[in-house]
Image (cartoon, helix red, strand yellow):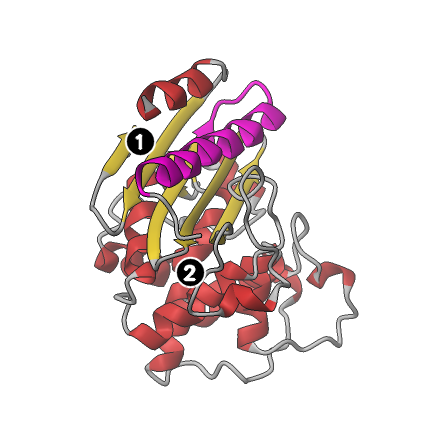
Amino acid sequence: MIKEKIADVINQLEGSVGLYFEDLDTGETITINESMSFPAASIIKIPLVSLVLKQASQGQLDLHAQITMADDNRVGGAGVITLLDKCFRPTVRDLALLAIVLSDNAATNQLIDLVGGVDAVKAHCSELGMLGTELQRKLMDYDAKEAGLDNITTPGDMGLILKLLAKGEFYSQEVSQQLVDMLKAQQLNLKLPYFIPALEPDDPSVYNKKVSPGTVVVAHKTGEIDGAQHDVGIFYLPGDRKYVLAVLTSDLSSDKAGAYAIAKISEIIYDRMKAVYPLPT
């Protein structure tokens, strides 16, 4: 029944859809076009920030070091850094947090430089087993995009890194939790969390070990460019249950419809989890 409900949503959408769902307690999966290549947009920032945190744990980066932003990294699009005075010197951790919670493109480009460039990120994705994911250019680099260089990923690859983070298996439990906490602070919440009782990121209980009955905590990252809407995340339910869901779209005739479809698919998954595996009350 759940697959039919998801298919009904997808069939009403003009565009391509990829999906990866896994219940981390039972191992049940639902996949649609899990190996299809999609423009990564801002969800590429998850593997990038994971590399930042890994390098910091290895002593290659200092999360507390203040950074002078390079002028050519102060690009537009999502984020706030370009609106701030040029004397603003964020720490490495600030940049990572801004890249995740506000999808800041300037922060992202500076982080790419700090970790060693696009090749370092590509190698990192390969090491993780994200073989369909490539960072080939910085954000908002239209010349590189015109030259055929684009950032790509797949629903399966996003599901993979989300699982590693949720299980504390990305590098270490501590590093995994650092990124999960950043994802829990996400400020862009009009897709995966929109139709479900997700706690707001400013609610202190988001970071509790136990999730309150009747609620869900979503640690997620959105992405969007013209004709493509994405959202990928880890869902924390009462009773220490977790699942991951990645929904990617492309070739959309309506971005608004794409975002709505992601929210509806998330609602269908959540309602099904409640029905099949009753949540504590």
Write the residue at 59% across / 72% down.
Answer: 94
Q: Nearer the viewer, residue 151 or 232?
A: 232
Tag of residue 171 = none
Write the residue at 31% across / 42% down.
Answer: 277
**SS assignment for the magenta stretch, majority:** helix
What residue would you read off at disc 2? 48
Residue 196 image point, x, y percent = 53, 41
Q: Is residue 54 visible?
A: no
Q: Amino acid at mark 2?
A: Leu
Kindly give the residue lying farthest to the front in the view shown.
281
Write the residue at 46% across / 27% down.
Answer: 250
274 falls in the magenta region: yes
Write the residue at 44% across / 50% down.
Answer: 44
Tag of residue 36 = 1
Left or right: 36 as drawn, with respect to 94 = left
Residue 235 image point, x, y percent = 41, 51
Dot 2 falls on a residue whose secondary structure is helix
Q: Nearer the viewer, residue 24 or 240?
A: 240
Q: Is residue 37 above or below residue 198?
A: above
Q: Which residues are magenta?
A: 249-277
